Image: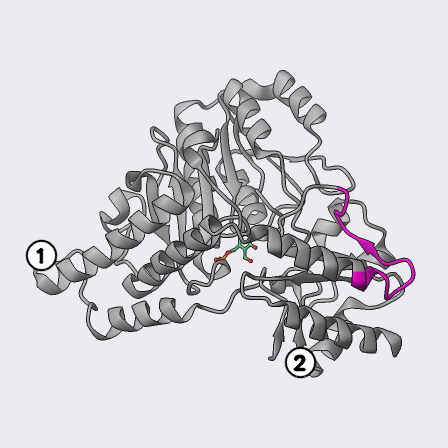
């Protein structure tokens, strides 16, 4: 695939990530729990990655639990925190989130029902941003019954950013645990957990040029979970199982590269590139709109609705011409269902069915954007 604008689905692993992983598989392949040299070398790899990750997100190494990815991290954060909280404070039964969350969160929250939870969906506005006034009302009325609130930092389909600082502060005032799914945020935008009211944050390596199969949960100090993966004392007894050393080490290297990129302050160039792309694509189709376009958005994402066109068909046509984009979340593609995120935002069904997500990465060049624009113009002219 020569032109890749689907970086919210996954990013290509950096060559330095691949080098580190190869080293782990060929040389440092020991079990990090072993006391001999091979084990110590593998343990060093894992702990180096923990320190690189901690620096990227601004937390202490003791707060990090490595997992197999964003999905497992969200499962552990939500089910683990709910079960522990509910056991200690049985009156806290309520678990809340907006309908624009990723299925990793939505399904974890649904599963809480089996353990006694009542689930409430929080309303969002037409950009998908949480309706803070109604959330505050709910907290005033039922805050004492609320165990957990989960709101993602940046949306995977639209890039829309939630006011997580305000949400976290409100949760804290009511003794409610706050989880944020930061899979699309970490590595792309600055993150300093030492200054934010977040109790549980989850993220994934493969969205920041790391490998698939690695992710992390960060726990605020003092937050205790019920473990999900039982069977070993790994990760301070919060996630049993022999660590995936190569993937974790690759994740660590990816974090170092992301930190370097963020420090080099090249984000603004990404914003300009995205804005140029967005303006040019909008001009290609009458009635085209940016979904979530009136809210703050993460720099790399643009979701455009083309009323009257079928996104699923466009994805295939673009793919045949060498351009990778997505018609909604990757896990939903292949089905003809309209995106739940756009549905929750109230986007009309015609526009939602014709909505495409274009997502850039730090490696996307101006030449890539020019080539993509030429190809998109050509394809849209034929419809
Ligand atoms: N949360 C969000 C917002 C995502 O975009 C994704 C992946 O697409 C996940 C969670 C799941 O992460 P993983 O693929 O590492 O399980």
Q: Would you say the magenta stretch is mainly helix, strand or loop?
A: loop
Q: Which mark is residue 35?
A: 1
Residue 287, magenta (yes or no): yes
Tell me where residue 321 appears, x and y as whole percent.
Answer: 71, 82
Residue 51 appears in the picture as rendered: yes
Say which residue appears at 33% left-offset and 50% top-offset.
Answer: 52
Q: Which residues are magenta?
A: 280-294
Q: Which mark is residue 322?
A: 2
Q: Is residue 278 left or right of residue 198?
A: right
Say which residue appears at 57% left-offset and 44% top-offset.
Answer: 110
Residue 68 appears in the picture as rendered: no
Tell me where residue 251 appears, x and y as whole percent.
Answer: 37, 59
Q: Is residue 151 left or right of residue 316?
A: left
Quadrant placement of the N terminus: bottom right
Q: Is the residue 331 above or below the residue 233 in the image?
A: below
Tell me where residue 81 appears, x and y as whole percent.
Answer: 43, 35
Q: Nearer the viewer, mark 2 or mark 1?
A: 2
Tell me where residue 304 appears, x and y as whole percent.
Answer: 77, 58
Q: Is residue 26 left or right of residue 214?
A: left
Q: Which mark is residue 278?
A: none
Q: Is the residue 83 above or below the residue 33 in the image?
A: above
Residue 41, magenta (yes or no): no
Quarter occupied by residue 8: bottom right
Cβ of mark 1 under 8 Å from ligand 1: the answer is no
Q: Is residue 141 left or right of residue 88?
A: right
Please name whichever residue, 56 or 80, is drawn nearer the observer in this view of the structure.
56
Query: Can you name the residue that lies furthest to the left here?
Result: 36
Say which residue appears at 76% left-offset and 37% top-offset.
Answer: 125
Alpha-carbon distance for marks 2 and 1? 50 Å
Q: Is the residue 123 above or below the residue 156 in the image?
A: above
Query: Can you name the residue that lies furthest to the bottom here?
Result: 320
Helix, strand or loop status at disc 2: loop
């Amino acid at each position: 695939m020569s032109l890749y604008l689907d970086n919210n689905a996954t990013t290509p692993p950096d060559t330095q990530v691949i080098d580190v992983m190869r080293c782990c598989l060929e040389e440092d392949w020991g079990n990090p729990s072993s006391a001999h040299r091979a084990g110590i070398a593998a343990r060093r790899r894992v702990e180096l990655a923990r320190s690189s990750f901690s620096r990227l997100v601004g937390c202490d190494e003791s707060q990090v639990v490595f997992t197999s990815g964003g999905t497992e991290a969200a499962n552990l954060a939500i089910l683990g925190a709910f079960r522990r909280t509910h056991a200690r404070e049985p009156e806290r039964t309520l678990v809340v989130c907006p309908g624009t969350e990723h299925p990793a969160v939505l399904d974890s929250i649904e599963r809480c029902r089996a353990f006694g939870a009542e689930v409430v969906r929080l309303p969002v506005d037409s950009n998908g941003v949480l309706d803070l006034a109604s959330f505050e009302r709910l907290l005033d009325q039922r805050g004492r019954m609320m165990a957990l609130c989960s709101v993602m930092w940046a949306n995977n389909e639209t890039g829309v950013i939630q006011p997580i600082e305000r949400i976290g502060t409100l949760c804290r005032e009511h003794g409610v645990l706050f989880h944020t799914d930061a899979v699309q945020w970490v590595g792309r935008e600055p993150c300093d957990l030492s200054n934010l009211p977040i109790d549980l944050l989850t993220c994934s390596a493969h969205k920041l040029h790391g490998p698939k199969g690695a992710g992390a949960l960060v726990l605020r100090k003092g937050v205790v979970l019920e473990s999900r993966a039982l069977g070993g004392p790994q990760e301070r007894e919060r996630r049993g199982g022999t660590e995936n050393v190569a993937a974790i080490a690759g994740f660590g290297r990816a974090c170092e590269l992301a930190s370097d990129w963020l420090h080099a302050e090249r984000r603004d160039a990404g914003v300009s590139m995205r804005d140029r792309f967005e303006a040019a694509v909008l001009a290609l189709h009458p009635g085209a709109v940016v979904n979530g376009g009136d809210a703050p958005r993460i720099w790399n994402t643009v979701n455009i609705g083309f009323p009257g066109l079928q996104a699923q068909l466009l994805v295939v046509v673009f793919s045949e011409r060498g351009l990778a984009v997505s018609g909604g979340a990757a896990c939903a593609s292949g089905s003809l269902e309209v995106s739940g995120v756009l549905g929750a935002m109230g986007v009309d069904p015609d526009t939602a069915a014709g909505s495409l997500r274009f997502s850039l990465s730090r490696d996307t060049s101006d030449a890539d954007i020019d080539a993509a624009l030429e190809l998109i113009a050509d394809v849209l002219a034929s419809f």
